[in-house]
Image (tube, helix red, strand yellow):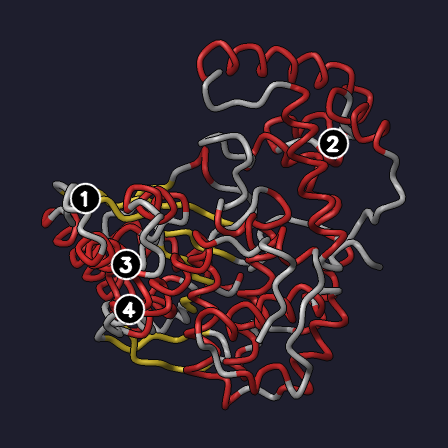
Amino acid sequence: MLKEQGNSITEEWKLYMYLLRCAIRGNEPDESVVKGFSGISSQMLWDMARNNNQVMLMEDYIRKYSKYINEEKFEHNKPLEFVIICYEIYKCIRRVVEAAKERGLTFVLFKGCILSNLYPNYIERSSCDTDIFVYREEKEQALNLLQELGYTELAEKSNPEVTALKYERGRVSHVIELHTCLWEDYEGRRMDILDSMEITKRETLINLKVCGFEVTTLGYEQHLIFQLFHIIKHFSLEGVGLKYLADIALYVDAYGKYIDKDSLWKKLDMLGFSKFSYYIFVICAEFLGMDTDILKGQKIEMGPEVVDFMQDLLQAGKIYGDKSAGWQILGMMTPYFTGNRGTSQSKWKRKLEVVFPRAKDLPDEFAYAKKMKFLLPVAWVHKAVNYLIRWSKYRDIMYNTSEKLEVAEHRIALMKGLGLLEK
C-alpha cells in the first residue's frame, strides 16, 4: 500500500478513484464502502467527471453513489441522441478502415478505438477525433480516399505533419487527424530519440479486432510508449485528467503480457520518462487495480511530490476554475516538454519570455518570424495585439499575465518533481 502524506490524499480522490475503478472493471460498487464517503456531494463527483472528460463512463456510478447516500437530487442522464451519434461515428471509422484496406493502404489507428475497446462499453470512453498514422509515400492516396468518402480538409487545424479532415452528415460530425509523424511537428532532443526507436516501423505493426472490426495498429510496446509520450505532452503543456490513467490501466492489463519489460524501461529511461511512468503505473496499480508486473519488481512507493501530481490529475491541470492552460502557455512550456530546456533557466528569464518569446518558441501563427528572425519584434507586437483582441472576447477563460506565469511555474515544478526536466 502507498503511504499517505498526512491527510494529503483527499477523500474526494479516494471516492472518485474507487468509483472509476468499478466503472472500468464493470463492477458494482460496494455499498458499505461508498457510504463511508457520505460527506461528498454527487454534484462534486459530477464536476470531477466533467473535468476529466468521463461523463459517459461515470454517470451511472455517480447515480449509484447518490442513491446509497440518499441524495436523490442527482438527475443527470445520458442523452440518447449522444449515444446514437457515438455509434454512428464508429460506423464512419469502420467505413474508412475498410475502404483503406480495399485500396491497399496502411492506415495505422492509435489511441481512440484501440483504447475504447478495452472499456466495458466502448462508447463510454469519449474521443474527440480519430487519429490515423499513414506512411508519407501513401499520404496523397490517403487524402484522395478520404475526400472521396466525403471528408474535407480543415486547413486551420492542420500542420505539415497532421492533416485534419471533417465529415458531416446530419447530426454526425467526425474528425480524422491524419498523421505522418506521431509527435506532430514538435522538434527536439526527445523527438530525435523517439525517431530512433522506429515505433511506426511496418514490421512491428499488429492487427486487432476492436469495437467490432479489425484494424492495424502499433505494436504493444510501441503503443504504450506512445501513450506515455502523449500523456507527458499534455501534462507538460496543460495538464491531464484521470481518463489517461484509466486508459493506461486497461491497456497494461490487456497487453502487458506481450511487452518486453526490459526493453520498455530501457526506452523510457532514454527518453527521461522512467520516473514519471513509474508513478503513473504505481497510481494505476494502487487505485485502479492494474497488474504490477509492468513495474518489473520495483518497490511500490511514492514521494511527497506525487500527492501534488494526483491532485493535479483530479483537477485535470486546472488551477483557475474552468480556465484551461493549453495554447495559453504553449510557447513557454514546449522547450521543457521536448527536452530542449532543463531547470537551469531562471524564473525572471521565464517571465521575460512570456512577453518576448524566442522565435522558435512562437506558435505557428507567427511562422514568418520563425523563418525570418529579423521580424521577431514585429511578431511580439502582433502577439500583443492578438492577446488584447482575445482578452476582449474571452476574458472569462483567458489568463492574465500573472496567472499565466503562475500556471507555468506550477507545471514546471510538477515536471521537475516527476523527473521530466532531468537531462
Residues at circles 3 and 1 in contact by the CB criterion of under 8 Å: no
Q: Could you tell me how far apart the alpha carbons at marks 4 and 1 are, in whole angstroms?
A: 20 Å
Q: Could you tell me how far apart the alpha carbons at marks 3 and 1 are, in whole angstroms?
A: 16 Å
Question: Looking at this view, is 410 or 102 the one in front?
Answer: 410
Identify the image quadrant of the N terminus: bottom right
The label on residue 57 is 3
First in sequence, mark 3 or 1: give its number.
3
The amino acid beneath tag 2 is Lys
The amino acid beneath tag 3 is Leu
The amino acid beneath tag 1 is Phe
With respect to residue 78, does 389 lie above or below? above
In this view, the mark in front (3 or 4):
4
First in sequence, mark 1 or 2: give its number.
1
First in sequence, mark 2 or 4: give its number.
4
How far across and how far down the image is residue 112, in percent? Answer: 37, 62
Q: Residue at x 26, y 74 (%)?
A: 27
Rendered image quadrant of residue 171: top left
Rendered image quadrant of residue 377: top right
The amino acid beneath tag 4 is Ser
The label on residue 74 is 1
User: Tag 3: Cα neighbours inside 10 Å, few (<14), some, or many (≥20)?
Assistant: many
Q: Is residue 100 visible?
A: no
User: Tag 2: Cα neighbours inside 10 Å, few (<14), some, or many (≥20)?
Assistant: few
In this view, the mark in front (2 or 4):
4
In this view, the mark in front (1 or 2):
1
Q: Secondary structure at mark 2?
A: helix
Q: Secondary structure at mark 4?
A: helix
How far across and how far down the image is residue 160, in percent? Answer: 56, 45
Q: Could you tell me how far apart the alpha carbons at marks 2 and 4 are, in whole angstroms?
A: 63 Å
First in sequence, mark 3 or 2: give its number.
3
Q: Secondary structure at mark 1?
A: loop
> Which residue is label 4 attached to?
32
